[in-house]
Image (tube, grey):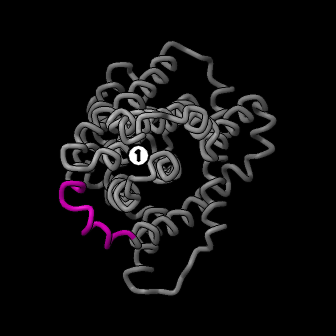
């Protein structure tokens, strides 16, 4: 049942350490994770998941099912920021709606990694092509969010132009996408020999570093809880609504293209997640008028905790129910 899966997930060490991190703020502990260490954890997880995905690609012949999976990822990366924008702009200023829509249209690599650890505990595999799909889903939302913002501005105020060179450079060569895709390519090119050489680093240390990173994420999420009073009921409700819509569409797509269980869960997790790293970094430069306390707080303090605590086991239950 879904409730037992949720309890089992909550009692998983990475999730418990997320709660422990929240307790740092709640109980006013002086525990601090150095920023450089936090950055390393993030880079490590992207490297490890990319390298493993590349190795899985090396082992798996390309098929029509994989092509459909990548197509589904591209469709969601394109559509989500568009309809999210039109939902959000009913109550938000348009630049805030565009930036937050970009977060929902992109993905959370850490949520993806946490879902992978959840599947690993259940001895369920997922394919390398879904990692490639994750890479496909990260950047388009950045481009679309900026386009939506520029289209909404009055050209008379000088807001209609787009710096395409800077925008595309950020979308294609931003640090997270560059490391993820680079590791994916290296993992694919080096095959079994590369995997055997890197396995002690990319797999054996993985869960421990994920656990420590979620401790840090718990601290970061709890720091922004007080800002939830400023984002208001609409944003909390809209965030939950968009998670439900995105996950539901993702479930329908997994059913339509007959994704295997592991891939299906990972795809739905990608659909339901929101970026709190890549997109906020891009929005700071591309849509400077947008309020970071809106798009960062919603992604980090609402969507991320709900997904890793309740969402992952619930999506898994629904995936199994429709298979």
Say if 48 sits above or below 233 in the image: above
Residue at 43%, 63% (x, y): give it: 15
Q: Quadrant of residue 105?
A: top left
Residue at 78%, 41% (x, y): give it: 196
Rendering coords of residue 77 (x, y %): 42, 31
- Between residues 264 and 186, which one lies in front from this camera angle? 186
Verify whether residue 1 appears in magenta.
Answer: no
Rendering coords of residue 52 (x, y %): 65, 39
Residue at 28%, 66% (x, y): give it: 228
- Between residues 154 and 37, which one lies in front from this camera angle? 154
Rendering coords of residue 290 (x, y %): 38, 53
Verify whether residue 233 appears in magenta.
Answer: yes
Say whether residue 29 is visible: yes
- In the rendered structure, the answer to whether residue 217 lies left or right of residue 205 reads left
Say if 101 sits above or below 37 in the image: above
Say if 137 sits above or below 304 in the image: above
Question: Crowding near pointer 1: few (<14 within 10 Å), some, many (20+)?
Answer: many
Q: Quadrant of residue 9?
A: bottom left
Kindly report the secondary structure that dominates the magenta region of the rendered protein.
helix
Say if 127 sits above or below 16 in the image: above
User: The residue tagged with tag 1: helix, strand or loop?
Assistant: helix
Q: How many marks?
A: 1
Say whether residue 118 is visible: no
Residue found at the very far front of the displayed protein: 156
* Residue identifier under label 1: 103
Rendering coords of residue 181 (x, y %): 64, 36
Residue found at the very far top of the displayed protein: 64
Check the picture and name the quadrant holding the C terminus.
Answer: top left
- In the rendered structure, the answer to whether residue 194 lies left or right of residue 143 reads right
Q: Which residues are magenta?
A: 224-236
- In the rendered structure, the answer to whether residue 130 lies left or right of residue 146 reads right
């Amino acid at each position: 049942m879904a409730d037992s899966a949720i309890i089992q997930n909550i009692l998983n060490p990475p999730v418990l350490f997320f709660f422990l991190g929240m307790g740092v703020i709640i109980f006013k502990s002086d525990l601090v994770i150095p920023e450089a260490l936090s950055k390393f954890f993030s880079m490590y997880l992207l490297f490890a998941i990319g390298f493993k995905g590349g190795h899985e690609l090396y082992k798996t012949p390309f098929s029509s099912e994989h092509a459909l999976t990548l197509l589904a990822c591209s469709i969601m990366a394109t559509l989500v920021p568009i309809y999210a924008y039109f939902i959000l702009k009913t109550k938000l200023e348009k630049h805030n709606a565009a930036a937050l829509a970009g977060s929902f249209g992109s993905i959370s690599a850490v949520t993806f990694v946490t879902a992978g650890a959840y599947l690993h505990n259940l001895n369920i595999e997922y394919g390398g092509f879904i990692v490639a799909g994750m890479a496909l889903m990260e950047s388009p939302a950045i481009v679309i969010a900026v386009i939506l913002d520029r289209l909404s501005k009055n050209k008379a105020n000088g807001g209609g132009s787009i710096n395409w060179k800077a925008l595309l450079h950020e979308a294609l060569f931003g640090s997270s996408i560059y490391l993820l895709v680079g590791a994916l390519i290296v993992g694919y090119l080096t095959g079994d020999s590369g995997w055997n050489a890197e396995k002690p680093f990319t797999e054996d240390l993985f869960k421990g570093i994920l656990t420590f990173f979620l401790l840090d994420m718990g601290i970061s999420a709890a720091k922004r809880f007080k800002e939830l009073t400023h984002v208001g009921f609409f944003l909390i409700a809209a965030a939950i609504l968009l998670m439900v819509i995105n996950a539901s569409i993702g479930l329908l797509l997994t059913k339509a293209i007959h994704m295997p269980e592991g891939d299906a869960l990972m795809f739905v997790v990608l659909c339901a997640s929101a970026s709190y790293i890549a997109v906020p970094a891009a929005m700071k430069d591309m849509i400077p008028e947008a309020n970071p306390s809106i798009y960062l707080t919603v992604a980090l303090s609402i969507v991320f905790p709900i997904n890793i605590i309740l969402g992952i086991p619930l999506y898994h239950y629904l995936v199994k129910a429709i298979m």
